[in-house]
Image (cartoon, rainbow, N blue to C red):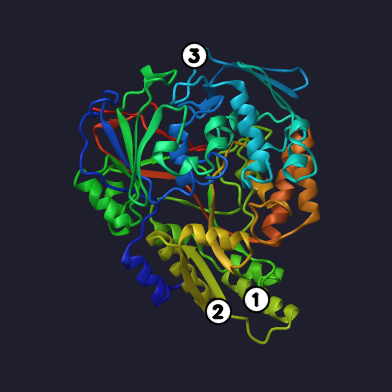
Amino acid sequence: MKKLSMLLMSVMLAGGVLAACGNDSSNGEAGEGEAAGKILRYNNGKEPTSLDPPIGFDQISYDIVNNAFEGLARLGKDDKPEPAMAAEWKVSDDGLVYTFTLRDGVKWSNGDPVKASDFEFAWKRLLNPETASDAAFLAYPIVGAEDYNSGKGSADAVGIKAKDDKTLEVTLRHPAAWLVQMTASPAFFPVHQATVEGNAQWAGEASTIVSNGPFTITEWKHEEELKMVKNKDYWDAGTVKLGGVTYKMVNDTNTAYQLFTTGELDTTGSIPADMADQLFADGKVKVEESAGTAFYRFNTTMEPFTNKSIRQAFVAAVDRQQLVDLVLRQKHKPAVGFVSPGLEDAAGGDFREVGGDLIGFDAAKAKELLAAGMKEAGYSALPPITLTYSTNDVNQKVAQALQAMFKDNLGVEVKLESKESKVMTAEQKALQLQLSRSSFLPDFADPINFLDGFQSDNPFSRTGWKNDKFDELIQGAYEQADEKQRYEMMHEAEKILMDDAPILPLYYYNSVNLESDKLSGVVRHAFGFIDFKWAELK
């Protein structure tokens, strides 16, 4: 292992943690007028981006939306989709037509019936160009969806039709075996049409949100906390044991950990680095499989990252094992490609294992690539470089570690810049940042979900990177019915993504938490979002 620089050593000693938590001062039974049961206190880390299902396309938003709303299917405890708003569904022999039948008696939180037309409205709203949803591309397997979203087609031509109040018919342009699982993703949750059409800001306050999930939002103190209570009209209310959930918004991991130790939180992912080894050794930490990748985006339209060799040099300069062992210290796996482990390949193996290690740490190679790139670009010295991260103590420690590695392994000085997450995301989308932090959490369990976001015109990319061969492979994978060939296309596409290096993968997510002995039944989906439907406090 390369000798640590003084800066990286200071990062280690300062202590680091991954995840977030919060506080609340009480945990009694639900109050008068609320459902019976105790209130679970959970930290969401920070204010959600939006609680409008097609807009809040990130974990901090969807961890809330997933408990306040519900789709046609819901991920069960085993991560497999189960009937939810839909009692059943049928698929045509050619795999192109899905017919969903809604349950009897399902209701919105205002007492209105949930209808198939609510889903048609919501899914077409997801695709409406005026909605500008970053999640819209997930629906592109549906007939007419991409044309409508890109402004080339009409809503009427989209293959989403409410045949009657209880029947929704979805027609695909090519088979997509993951469609049912995708209906369990918050982007595909229904919205109450009259509410949405009557108030453009409906999702901004607790008093105006109409939902249909296990819990109902009753109070929202912005930047502080959001409260939910059990939805007595939820179709499966008998399964819900909690009286409610209080989401706190504490963005400092050490503060959140202290709140857990004093009993003001029931569960937390905040584990100070200087205590991590002992907590793991004492068996106090709950570690679960998860999915997703922490990474940085290069702006390939901004110097010096217009040059492929320079991007590759920065990728090779990062010692990911050192990062997870000495900075994060929560048993993460170093990233060796973009697609995280846990996805089955066509032959039954693990997609990541079959794909192998596509990137790795090599300081000597990094220096060679940097020298080659500078020669190609005609640089005698690199232009100034700024690494931007969203404000958070963990993100800061990771950024400081990378800053040290770039100095040690490339001889490059990198300036650090912190921004509020909403501002940073907006600037990423506008291609205003050189090198910036990101993360990806999958919406469904298929490698295509990791890869398709980097197509040339996909708004998720935020890199300015365009590669015709990559685009061709992803489109081919969408349309390929032969699973073996489809996976071969995805492996080839990932190799191109890693070789062209518009992104710098860091590590794969896991789920590391401390939980009260009184708490059970919290489900943290590897390919989805946290679910309190089955949680219980004794």
Position of residue 160 in the picture relative to residue 480 (left or right): left
Mark 1 vs 2: CB contact within 8 A? yes
Return the x and y of residue 11 as percentages of the image width and height. Answer: 37, 68
Position of residue 248 in the picture relative to residue 48 (left or right): left
Which residue position is annotated with label 1? 370
Q: Nearer the viewer, residue 339 or 396?
A: 396
Above or below for 180 versus 500: above
Q: What amino acid does circle 1 point to? A: Leu
Above or below for 384 versus 223: below
1 or 3: tag closer to the N-terminus: 3
Query: From this viewpoint, which residue is outermost toward the front?
Result: 198
Q: Which mark is residue 105?
A: 3
Q: Which mark is residue 301?
A: none
Q: What amino acid does circle 3 point to? A: Gly
Q: Nearer the viewer, residue 2 or 307?
A: 307
Mark 3 vs 2: CB contact within 8 A? no
Which residue position is annotated with label 2? 412
Return the x and y of residue 216 as percentages of the image width and height. Answer: 39, 31
**Would you say residue 411 is visible in this rendering?**
yes
Q: What amino acid does circle 2 point to? A: Val
Q: Compute the Cα span from label 3 to label 2.
A: 63 Å
Identified at 56% across, 42% down, the residue is: 442
